[in-house]
Image (spheres, rainbow, N blue to C red):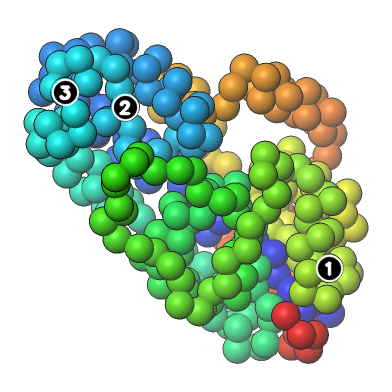
């Protein structure tokens, strides 16, 4: 019987890639239209900024693009001139930010059964908290493990705080990324559980599934979250502005080669199928 669900967030609970691509591309195209700076010139500058801050979701990216600084000046001037681009980003994000089918009902059923629900993501805390808050998962997810946030520009205060009221935030070690079975085992130990008590679900066989199996945890592959690879054209934009360094890309390639024969025993096409795979029971340990 299982009493702990450890779930990836991005492309497992919601379609992170579509959210990112729709909002970022809308902003990028509008910035190019307003500024008359070609997208091809903006993308490499954005990539350097994303790499500096370790995320492709950096909220202050426009303020740091050299071409925009040269054209408009400081932060206030840039944000004023490109207000419609910022609005386009937020509008597309709002439009596409929703849970996959059956996710909420399944999580609520697991909560009713007393299962401990842990989120484990590589997205930084602020952006993860934003989505957890907007998707009404605050308190549905008991504990959220994520990297700490990047720094913000001097003199800038985030417009909105997304500190969670019920979900507990905990941080993964600086610079550590999936697949890391040691971190997963530490997450399990931190709640006084054992690997055999847990189920792990994620959308990457290379990262999520391989990590869970190496940690001795039953793993479920969320195949429905893997569809973004089908559209190579859309995915190319993420590659062109990725926060990954060349070294990280090479490390990812090596891991992919090493784990190419790793496959999950359990593969699902809808989140609710989890309930048919295991018998879930109440978690009785102290968190």
Q: In terms of sequence position, does the residue under pointer 1 or pointer 3 come before the other?
A: 3
Q: From the viewer's perspective, is residue 6 above or below residue 21?
A: below
| Kind of element beneath mark 2 | helix
The residue shown at (13%, 22%) is 72
Left or right relative to 54: residue 222: right
Q: Which residue is drawn at 46% across and 71% down?
A: 164
Quadrant in which the N terminus is drawn: bottom right
**Which of the two marks, 1 or 2, is nearer to us in this view?**
2
**Could you say which quadrant of the image residue 97 lies in?**
bottom left
Using the image, tell me which numbered label, if any, was put on residue 64: 2
At which x and y percent is residue 148? Answer: 56, 51
The CA span between labels 1 and 2 is 41 Å
Residue 216 visible in the shown view: yes
Please tell me whether mark 1 or mark 3 is closer to you in this view.
3
Number of callouts in the render?
A: 3
Circles 2 and 3, Cβ within 8 Å, touching? The answer is no
Of helix, strand and loop, which one carries label 1?
A: helix
The picture places residue 67, in percent across and down from the top left corner, at 24, 15
Q: How far apart are marks 1 and 3 (CA)?
A: 50 Å
Query: 10 Å neighbourhood of mark 1: few (<14), some, or many (≥20)?
Result: few
Q: Mark 1 points at which residue?
A: 189
Residue 167 in the image: state x and y as whole percent. Answer: 54, 74
Q: Tell me where residue 108 sits by quadrant.
A: bottom right
Which residue is labeled 3 in the image?
Answer: 73
Label located before the other in sequence (2 or 3): 2
């Amino acid at each position: 019987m299982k009493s702990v669900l450890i779930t990836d967030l991005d492309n497992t609970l919601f379609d992170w890639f579509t959210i990112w691509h729709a909002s970022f591309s809308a902003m990028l195209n509008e910035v190019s239209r307003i500024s008359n700076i070609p997208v091809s010139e903006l993308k490499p500058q954005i990539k350097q900024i994303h790499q500096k801050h370790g995320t492709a979701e950096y909220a202050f990216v426009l303020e740091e693009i050299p071409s925009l600084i040269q054209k408009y000046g400081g932060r206030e001037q840039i944000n004023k001139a490109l207000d419609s681009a910022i609005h386009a980003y937020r509008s597309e994000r709002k439009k596409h930010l929703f849970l996959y089918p059956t996710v909420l009902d399944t999580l609520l059923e697991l909560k009713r059964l007393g299962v401990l629900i842990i989120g484990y993501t590589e997205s930084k805390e602020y952006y993860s908290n934003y989505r957890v808050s907007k998707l009404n998962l605050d308190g549905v997810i008991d504990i959220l493990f994520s990297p700490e946030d990047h720094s913000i520009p001097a003199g800038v205060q985030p417009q909105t705080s997304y500190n969670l009221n019920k979900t507990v935030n905990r941080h993964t070690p600086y610079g550590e990324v999936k697949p890391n079975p040691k971190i997963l085992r530490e997450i399990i130990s931190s709640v006084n559980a054992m690997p055999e008590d847990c189920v792990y679900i994620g959308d990457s066989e290379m990262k999520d599934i391989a990590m869970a199996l190496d940690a001795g945890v039953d793993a479920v592959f969320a195949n429905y979250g893997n569809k973004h690879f089908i559209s190579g054209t859309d995915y190319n934009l993420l590659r062109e502005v990725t926060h990954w360094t060349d070294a990280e890309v090479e490390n990812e390639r090596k891991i992919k080669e090493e784990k190419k024969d790793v496959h999950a025993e359990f593969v699902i096409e809808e989140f609710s199928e989890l309930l048919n795979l295991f018998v879930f029971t109440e978690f009785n340990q102290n968190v």
